[in-house]
Structure formats: C-alpha cells, structure tokens
Image: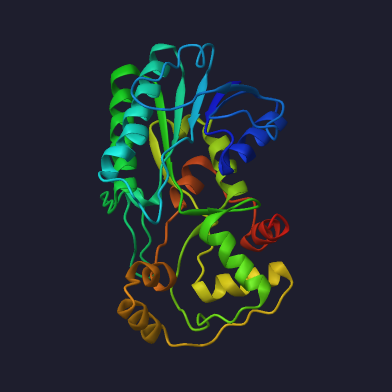
Amino acid sequence: MKLLITGANGFVGKSLCSELSNQGHTVRAAVRSLDKQLVDVDRIVIASIDKSTDWSPTIQNIEVVIHLAARVHVMNEIAVDALAEFRKVNVDGTLNLATQAAKAGVKRFIFVSSVKVNGEHTLANYPFTENDDANPQDPYGISKHEAEQGLLLIAQQTGMEVVIMRPPLVYGAGVKANFASMMRVVKRGIPLPLGAIHNKRSFVYVGNLVSLIVRCIDHPAAANQVFLVSDGSDLSTTELLQKCAVALGVKARLLPVPQKLLTFSLGLLGKKAVAQRLCGNLQVDICKAKILLDWVPPVSVEDGLKATALGLI
C-alpha cells in the first residue's frame, strides 16, 4: 500500500515509518527538513503546513494519508493570539491537506489528534470515552477538536474515510520534554516528594500507538471512527516513578509527602497546572479499539519503559 506520512521525522513519525517499511508498505514521508534517520522512504520537504500548502505532487498515487504533523502544545506559549496560531496549522493546514487528498482519490485519512479534545482531567475510575462530549480547555485542544469536526464533514461530503485517534502522553525511546526530564531525575537518584500520590493516569508507549495506527490503515471497521488509545494500564504518579526506576536499574527515592499538602503547596507557588499533572487523574477507556478492531496494546508498560530507558541520553 502507498502511504503518505506527515510529520514523518517527528517522535511518532520515525517509529511509524520504520514499522510500515518493515511491513512492506511504500512510504512517502513529508518532512520539514531532510533527516538521515529516515531510511527506505521517499522523503519530500514541506517547509510549512497551512491553508495554502500545495500537496498535489506529494499525494499523487497515495492511498492512505496519516497526518501526524501539528503545531504542538507548549508549556510557555508566547504568541499574542495562541489560538489563531494553532488554527493556522492544526485546523487550516489539516483541512487543506484533507480536501486535496479527497480530490486526489485518497481512500482513507488517519488523523492523530489528542486526548485534550476530551478535556484535561477525569474523576478517578471514570475514564474518558469516545462518546463523551468534547471539552477542550486550551488553544491546542480547541484546534484539534475543530480539525476533527472539519475532517468528519469532509468525509461526509467526499466519501473519503476518516479515522481519528486521541492519544494521551506518548513515551518511548527518544522522548523529550517533561517525560525525559523525569526519567533523568530518577536516574540521578534525586529525592522527589512524590511517594504518596494516588491518582490514575493513562499513557501510551509509542510502539502501541504505532500498532493502532497500522491497524487502522485498512481495517473496515475503523472508517469514520474516533478511537482513544493507551497502554491499557493506568498508573499513579508514584507507580510511574517506581516503574521508571526499575527500568533504569536504580532505586526510586520518593518521599511520602501527603498528596493534599503537595497540591496545596504547589498552589501557593502558582503551580496549579503542575499540581494537576502530578496529582490529577486523566484516564482513557480503550474498549472501543479492543472490541471494534480486535486490538490490544502489544507492549507492556514495563517493556515500554525499558525501551525508553535504553534510549535515554
């Protein structure tokens, strides 16, 4: 099968291109710059993605588009109108690509969205499902939701099949940002006041996300569906740090500071968002993918964290 992957030289894109090539698919990779790590794929440089990007030479003879490229969520946004900036890429750019893909005869368009479309937190043991009302809280989540709505409309108008998946935090070898920083802190044996957190959060190993994407390439039941995805094993912050320590081969140094005290202290410091990420719940239910697509995450949390630890620089 001939596939176009946007954002192919990103964290998820590299793993996806490798897996698809190994399976014998013909992969065309849309990248912002040439990357020597991408092999066995046809690389095409797309400098920017917005409403005016011309995809005509890139989508020629393509059967499936997997759209990973996006303006990603950032912790310290500096744009005056952040939502407008997110919309340029995540909404206008996505819908422009999808419209051109439909006209070119692309059969299926797979869009990797975000759990942020569902919202920022859940009650314990009440995970998000695909049937919940959307409740995006920040410009990134709003832009992803608007893109989803536009894609489903394009599917209705053109007959091109659309598949949407919403992952939570993705980890794996080469992961950056907060997850990599957390593992480095654990590796160094720095004491953390996170030994008594009893929340539940969903994560997804990059190999598990890639597995579901691949399953959705040609599965008939995936057409025009939305799927939540995770490892299928939710962890508290304390449990995650303990498992990271095991994967790194070190002893976790976690101080049992009461969760309420930690949350209160972070609030006084103006770090309510940090407190939410460390102590809040964010769970997703993956039963729909399991039942409709007969899919189960192939990699356990423990093995995923081991792979992440091996790739830690």
Task: Say which of 227 and 5 sits in front.
Answer: 5
The residue at the point 66 percent across, 57 percent down is 308
Q: Quadrant of residue 199?
A: bottom left
Q: Is residue 2 left or right of residue 196?
A: right
Q: Quadrant of residue 165?
A: top left
Residue 118: percent from left, percent from top = 32, 52
Q: Is residue 239 left or right of residue 159?
A: right
Residue 113 versus residue 25 in the image, above or below:
below
Residue 136 versus residue 49 in the image, above or below:
below
State the quadrant of the N terminus. Answer: top right
Q: Is residue 226 left or right of residue 230?
A: left
Residue 149 versus residue 117 in the image, above or below:
above
Residue 227: percent from left, percent from top = 43, 44
The residue at the point 40 percent across, 23 percent down is 97
State the quadrant of the C terminus. Answer: bottom right
Query: Do we see residue 289 in this rendering?
Result: yes
The residue at the point 38 percent across, 72 percent down is 275
Task: Say which of 53 and 292 sits in front.
Answer: 53
